[in-house]
Image (tube, grey):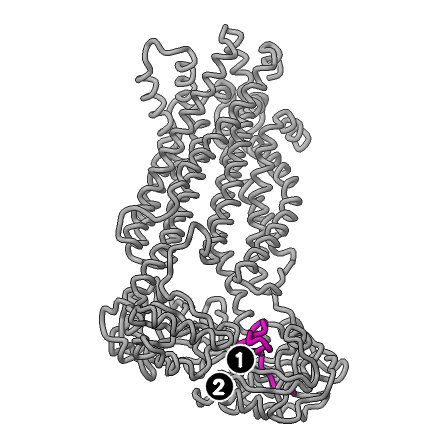
Amino acid sequence: MFRLAMRMAGNRITALIAMVCAVLGGAALMTATGVLAESGLRSHLPVGRLAGADVVVAADQEFHPQGDLPIALPERRRIPASLVNALSGLTGVEAVAGDIAFPAALVDARGGVVPIDGPGTAGHGWSSTKLLAEPGIEGRAPGGPGEVALSRAIAGAAGVGVGGRVEIVAAGRPADGYRVSAVVDAPDAGILFTDTTAARLSDRVKAAGGPHADTVDLIGLRTAPGAGERVAAEVRTKLRGTGLETVTGAARGDLVSPGGGASRSLLVALSGSLAGIVLLITGFVVSSALAVSVGGQRRDLALMRAVGATPRQVRRFVVVQATVIAGTALVPAVGLGHLLAGYARRMLADQGVVPEALPLYVSPLPAVATVTLVVLAVQIAARCAAWRTSRLPATEAVVQSRSEPRQPSRTRTRAGMLVIVAATTLSVVPLVARTALGAAATSLAGIIGAIGLALVGPALVRRLGTAASLRTRPGASASAWLAMSNIRAHALHNAGIVSALAMAVVFVLTYTFAQTTVLAATTDDARAGTLAQQRLTAPELGGLPADTLAAVRNVPGVRAAAPVSRTSVVYEYAQFGETVAESASAMVLTSDASQVLDLDVRRGSLDRLTGRTVAVSDDVAASLGAEVGGRVRLVLGDGTRIAAEVVAVYARGLGFGPVVLSHDLATGHTTAALDQSILVRTDGTVRARQGLDAFASARPGFVLQEADPRPADGLKGSPPEVWINLAVIVVLLTYLLLNIANKLVASTAQRRTEMAALRLNGTTPAQIRAMVRREAAFTIVTALTTGLLLSAVPLALVGQGFLGRPWPAGPIWLLPSLALAVTVTAVLAVELPARRALHTPPAEACRAQ
C-alpha cells in the first residue's frame, strides 16, 4: 500500500507541492509559537552580577493562583537583613553578602548623565563584590562616605579613573561629589558605595515604607568547591515555611532584575494569544490542501473500490499517503520554526518587550507537540476528504469520480450556518467588554465565520453560479457560458478556493482593525483625560529626585503638578464558578491628581485617594463587585496582599489602566521607590513653557515632553504591540496567500483533461483562457464580497464598543491593498498553469490521464 500510495502521489506533483507547503508553513509557525511559549516558562536571564554566588536566597517573585500558571511580580520583594548573619555560620559557606540596590546615576563633567543599563537599581554596597565572579579590582574599597567604586564600563563612559572626581545622583538625592577609589572589571557591577553609605541611601528610599527598614534585596552565598548543593539543601531546610526561595544554577539570573524576569510571562501571553489563531489557520489550510489532493485522485480511488478495495482500505490508503507526504515536510518545518522563533525574539527585544539578554529555551518539546498535532490533523483531514468516495458503491464511485454531487450536503450547509451564527454571537463581546479580550474576540469571530463559510460554501457558490448563469445574456460568448457551467458543476471545488481567499480577507481585516481600533480608543481616552500640558521625567536617573515636585510647583505659570507612576497589581474574581487571577497595570496617583487628569469618574472622587485607598475602572468594579466605600483585595507588584477601600469608579480604564493606587499605598512597594513622572498643568503662556524648559535643562537627566498623547504619524511612534501584531499579520497572510496560490495551481493543473476535451470539441485556446479568467473573476469577487460581509458585523461591533460608532479605526489603504493582493495571487495562480496546460497537445493530455 505504501509503494502504491507514493506512486500515485508522484503522478500529481502540483497537489503534492501544495500539501507540502501547507504542512511546512503551518508546522513552522506552530513550532515557533511553541518555542516562544517554552522560553517564557523555562528560559532564564544570564546570571550576570550574581555569577560569584553559588547559592542565592530571595523572596518568591511570583504570585501563585490556584489552578493556574504563576504570575510574575515585577517589583522587588525584600527579605530580612538578619538572615545574612544567620546563614554565614553554615558549614561550607566561605562568604555571605546581602545585596542592596537603589537608583544611582553618574553626572559627567559636561553636566550630562552617563548612560547606564537599569539606573533604577545601579547603586550597591561594596560587599556585593562578593557576588561577582572573579572581579578585577583596580584600586581599593571605598573608605568613607565620600568615596565610590565604578564598574569599568561606567568609568570608561565617564572618562574617569581611580582618584578622579565624579558627581552622583543617588536614591533621589541631589547630586553629590565623590572620589573614585576603585574601578571594578565585572559586568553589571554598577556604582558601589561603602556598605554604611549604601544602607543609609537605601534606607532613605525604604524609610517611607516603614516595613522595609533593615532589609536587603537578596543574599548571596559563596561556597567551598563542590559544596553548593549541600549548602542549598541546608538553607532550604532552615528557611522552610518562610516563603523565601533558595536558588542555584541558571535560575539565579532571574533574581538580578525582577522586572526582567517578569518579562518572560509576556512571551507566554503572546504565544497563548497567537496559538489559537495559528492552529485554526493551519488546520484550515492543511485540510483545504488535502481536499485538493484527494479530489484529484477520486477516479483512482473509485477504481480501487471497483477492484475490491474496502472503504476502510481506501481511507487507510489516503491516510498513509497524506501522512508520509506531511512527514517529509515536518523535519525542515521544525528547523524553520526555530529560526522564526529567533527572529521573533530579536524583534521583541528591539521593541523593548523582553530583555535583549533573554535567550530562547531550545528543547524537543515544541517539535514533538507540533509533529503530534500536525500528524493528527492530517489524518483526520485525510479521512474526512476520502469519506464520501470510500463509502460509495464501486460503480457509483467510478461514475461520480469526474463529477460532484448534484446537491450540496444539507447537513454541511446547516452546520456552516450554525458556525456563522456562533461567530456573529461572539462578535458581541466588545459591546460588553471594552478590553483587549473583547478586541481579541473580534479576530476570533472573523476566523470562525470564515470556517463557517467553508462549510456553507458549496451551497452558496452553486446558488450564485445559478443566478449568474440565469442573468447571462443569450448572446454571451461561449467562454462565459462555459465558465458559468463550470462554476455550477464544480461548486464544491470552487467553494474551497472562495473560502480560502475569504479567510485571508477576514483574517487581515478583523485582526488589523481590531488592533488599530483599540489603539485609537486608548489614545482617545488618554487625550481626553489628560488636562496637563507637560510631562517631566528622568529615566536616566531611575526616577525623579524627591524635591522635584515642590520645585516644579514654584515655577511661574504652573497651576498644578502631580506625580504619576506605574506599577502592577493582581486581582482575583469569580468567572463561571471558578476563581480567575488577572495581572494588570496600575497607576499611582495622589489626591490632587484630578487637577491634571480626568479619568471620567462616575462615582466617588479622586480627592479621597490617600492612605489605603484605590480607584477602579467600571470594568474591574463589575468583575469584583466593588462599589465606592467597599473594599477590594489586591496583590501589589511586590506580592504584598492588601485590602483597600474603593474611593472612585471611573470610565476611562482603557486609556489609564484598570486600577489606580494611592501614592501612600504604593510607597515602599516598588523597586526604585521614586516617582516616574510629574504631570504639569500651566496657564498656557509662553512664559510658563520657557520656565519649565529652563527648569529641566538646569537639572541633569530631566526630560520635558508633551503630556497630551498625539496620534501616531502612520506607524511611527506606535507602541511595540502594534509592530508585533503587524509582523504576525504579514507572516500569516504570506502563509495563507502562498498556500492559496499552491492550491489554485494544483486545482488548475488537474483540469488538463477537461481543457483537452474542450479543445478536441473545437474550443480554441483563447476561449479556454477567457473561460478560466471569468471563473477566476467570479471566485475573486465572491471571496472579497463574502470576506467583507463576514468582517462587517465584527468590525461594526468593535467600533461601536470601543469608539461609539459602527465602524472601526485603521488605515483606509488596507482594503484596496488587500483586494489587490488577493486578485494578483488568484489571477497568476490560475493563468500560468492554464497556459502551461494548453501547451500540451490535447490528445497527449487525455492519454496522460
Residue 516 percent location from the top left of the image: 39, 51
Q: Characterize the local packing of mark 1: few (<14), some (14-19) or many (20 or more) Cα atoms within 10 angstroms.
A: many
Amino acid type of the residue tagged 2 in the rendering: Val
Name the residue: 35% across, 29% down: 460
Image quadrant occupied by the N terminus: top right
Q: Which residues are magenta?
A: 107-127
Q: Mark 2 highlights which residue?
A: 205
Q: Which label was assigned to residue 103?
A: 1
Amino acid type of the residue tagged 1 in the rendering: Pro
Name the residue: 56% across, 55% down: 347
**115 part of magenta stretch:** yes
Name the residue: 64% across, 38% down: 324
Under circle 2, the secondary element is: helix
Question: In the drawing, does residue 238 fall left or right of residue 225?
Answer: left
Label 2, label 1: how far apart the Cα atoms are: 9 Å
Q: Nearer the viewer, residue 52 or 334?
A: 52
